[in-house]
Image (cartoon, coloured by chain):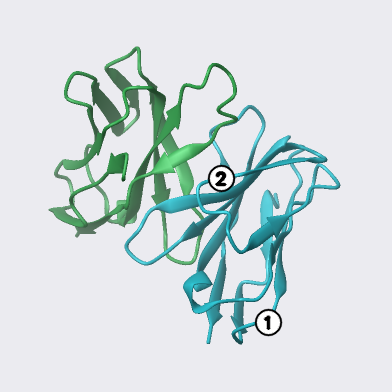
Chain colours: A cyan, B green
Amino acid sequence: NAGVTQTPKFRILKIGQSMTLQCTQDMNHNYMYWYRQDPGMGLKLIYYSVGAGITDKGEVPNGYNVSRSTTEDFPLRLELAAPSQTSVYFCASSSVGWPQHFGDGTRLSIL
Amino acid sequence: DQQVKQNSPSLSVQEGRISILNCDYTNSMFDYFLWYKKYPAEGPTFLISISSIKDKNEDGRFTVFLNKSAKHLSLHIVPSQPGDSAVYFCAARLDAGGTSYGKLTFGQGTILTVHP
């Protein structure tokens, strides 16, 4: 009953460091998404993918990169971390676009 | 430009009473609206949805109402239970002629607290 699994759950980065947030789903969903949620705000779409090898930008893609080499995995890469990227990151997947199934999030702090 | 707004950051109700959570939107091209529920340290969980061609959808204790002319939707929970205490997000999908790919625009969320 894994669903969407995100790792790590928590991470502290220094400014300028890079890291990859991992996301994997076991539901054979074609569509996958990355969102960020800032305090008191709704979720904002960073990147999405409609299948292996196909990705596209969402509302707030700057400072991030993604890849989709398999149906199951959709990692999010942060290059040159900045304090503005402190947030909670959610990965989601769906079979026909919605409703989306979410992971439990990665809480990232950049100091 | 926030296209989906939840203007009430929080709502407090007594157990057994009705909870009404509200959401307003600005884009008339949204074709589906969804409500998600989120507990602390967990991801959002899909609760209920409604198509823009309907004005009501019901699922057990949860009913969503859509008023297209007012660009307003609401979620009614009757009766409210302490386990309903969570953050509720409304979300909307843009009708892009089949190319929306399920992308959602979320409101800011409303914290619901149901007191025993």
Q: Is residue A81 found left or right of A55 in the rendered image?
A: left
Q: Is mark 1 on a helix, strand or loop?
A: loop
Residue A2 drawn at (x, y percent):
70, 52
Question: Horizontal and vertical percent for residue B116?
Answer: 19, 60
- Dot placed on the residue nearer the N-terminal end, 1 or 2: 1
Tally of numbered tags: 2
Q: Can residue B51 be seen by looking at this rendering?
A: yes
> In the drawing, what numbered circle is on residue A17?
1
Q: Which residue is drawn at 60% across and 30% down?
A: B101
Q: Which chain carries label 2?
A: A
Q: Of residues A49 and B47, which is closer to you in this image?
A: A49
Q: Is residue B43 above or below residue B17?
A: below
Where in the figure is residue B63, as x and y percent of width and height? 28, 29
Which residue in the structure is indicated by mark 2? A58
Going by the numbered disc 2, the residue's amino acid type is: Gly
Choose between B77 and A73: the one closer to the eye: A73
> In the picture provided, is B67 more to the left or to the right than A21?
left
Q: In this view, does A60 lie to the left or right of B19?
A: right
The quadrant holding residue B87 is bottom left
